[in-house]
Image (cartoon, rainbow, N blue to C red):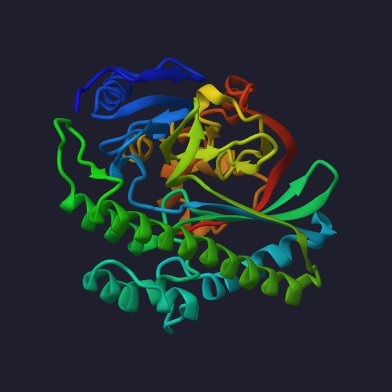
Amino acid sequence: MNVRLANVKTWLAEPMSKEVARAIERLATSADVRHVAVMPDVHLARDVCVGTAVATSELIYPAAVGTDIGCGIAAVGFDASSDVIDQRVASELLERLRGSVPVHRRAERSLPKELMDALLSDPKLERIRARDGSVQFGTLGRGNHFLEFQLDDEGRLWLMVHSGSRAMGQAIRDLHEGKASGEGSALKSLRAISAEGAAYINDMEWARTYARASRIAMIEAAAHVLGQLAGAQLDRSSYFDCDHNHVRLEAHFGSELWVHRKGAMSADEGEVGSIPGSMGTRSFHVSGRGEALSLRSSSHGAGRAMSRDEARRRVRSFEFRRKMEGIYFDLRLSEALREESPQAYKDVSKVLRAEAGLTRIVRRLKPIVVYKGA
């Protein structure tokens, strides 16, 4: 298979760093890569940058999906305004969420039957599902994952959850990357039409289903707590979910191509999605414009401006708390959450302006209560 430079299109909010540019070039010269779309939230990550969409015709690159397969955002509105959350309710809400939506793992094993019964490709994955998958289902995880109660411009209360497939996604990526070959590229790949490729696709789709069901479980748990405290009820008709770490066969440029998205959201014409800013800034509900050159994709958030190590060095606790003024969160985690401070992220408004041709803004949301793990 000949290696050639793929067609690369960019939507940038700021110039790419040299490290990101080199990573994009490495991706664009990998075997069978036909098209690369770079989103304005692009930032450096292991092997393949977050904020990229990649199209191939024959090969699947697990690294271009990443470890947190199916990571995404679910959102739903309430039949109430934000007035139902005052300081007392917010404080009690944050405390009760620690038990109803654990960060790390549950005390009991809980996995829907359809997820437990579905076939995975390797006995090792079956064992991890029974062990880690069952106790991490319905748990938030750390890093940039969050559960937020938000206020829209009409005063309506919304809930947004950002989470993924937890240990299962990592295990699936590691297992299949170990079976992949170089095909003359720096990145390892699997042939889509092969037993190995089919096994990865099967397990990847399972992880997407796991992540989506886990987000629903967290929404139900958080809504139950708020209902007990303030009487607010979910408007389930408003619910939507979008994930931003996957690969699937799609029609582009007159061909069937394998589109990998890593930290990039599908943005077909009219497709609804969420673009969060940071734990101290606005988030947005959007609809896609179906831009062909972006592989009908968009950003999945603001994107990091600082690495976690850099944020821990540069962001002081008092600066972080000042940025979070007026937003309820667990003050005991101030030191640990500095790496998630608004200063550590790009300006989401600039990101949205840079990709104005990819999405339309449907709704603006301001954080009221932010629940995160550390």
Q: Who's the residue at 58% across and 40% down the image?
A: 322
Judge by depth and name the residue closer to the eye, 194 or 237. 194
> How many numbered marks does the figure carry?
0
Judge by depth and name the residue closer to the eye, 159 or 251. 251
Quarter of the figure with the N terminus = top left
Q: Quarter of the image holding residue 34?
A: top left
Judge by depth and name the residue closer to the eye, 163 or 256. 256
Q: In the rendering, at what x and y percent does residue 121 appear?
A: 28, 66
The answer to whether residue 12 is above or below residue 117 is above
Q: In the drawing, does residue 82 fall left or right of residue 127?
A: right
Q: Who's the residue at 52% across and 66% down the image?
A: 214
Toward the top, the furthest residue is 15
Q: Is residue 314 visible?
A: no
The answer to whether residue 131 is above or below residue 199 is below
Judge by depth and name the residue closer to the eye, 196 or 343. 196
Q: Quarter of the image holding residue 309?
A: top left
Q: In the rendering, at what x and y percent does residue 299 appear?
A: 53, 33
Quarter of the figure with the C terminus = bottom left
The answer to whether residue 39 is above or below residue 93 is above
Q: In the drawing, does residue 193 fall left or right of residue 92?
A: left
Q: In the rendering, at what x and y percent does residue 192 appear?
A: 30, 46
Q: In the drawing, does residue 288 fall left or right of residue 176?
A: right
Q: In the rendering, at what x and y percent does residue 364 appear?
A: 73, 38
Q: Who's the residue at 33% across and 20% down the image?
A: 6
Q: Is residue 278 visible?
A: yes
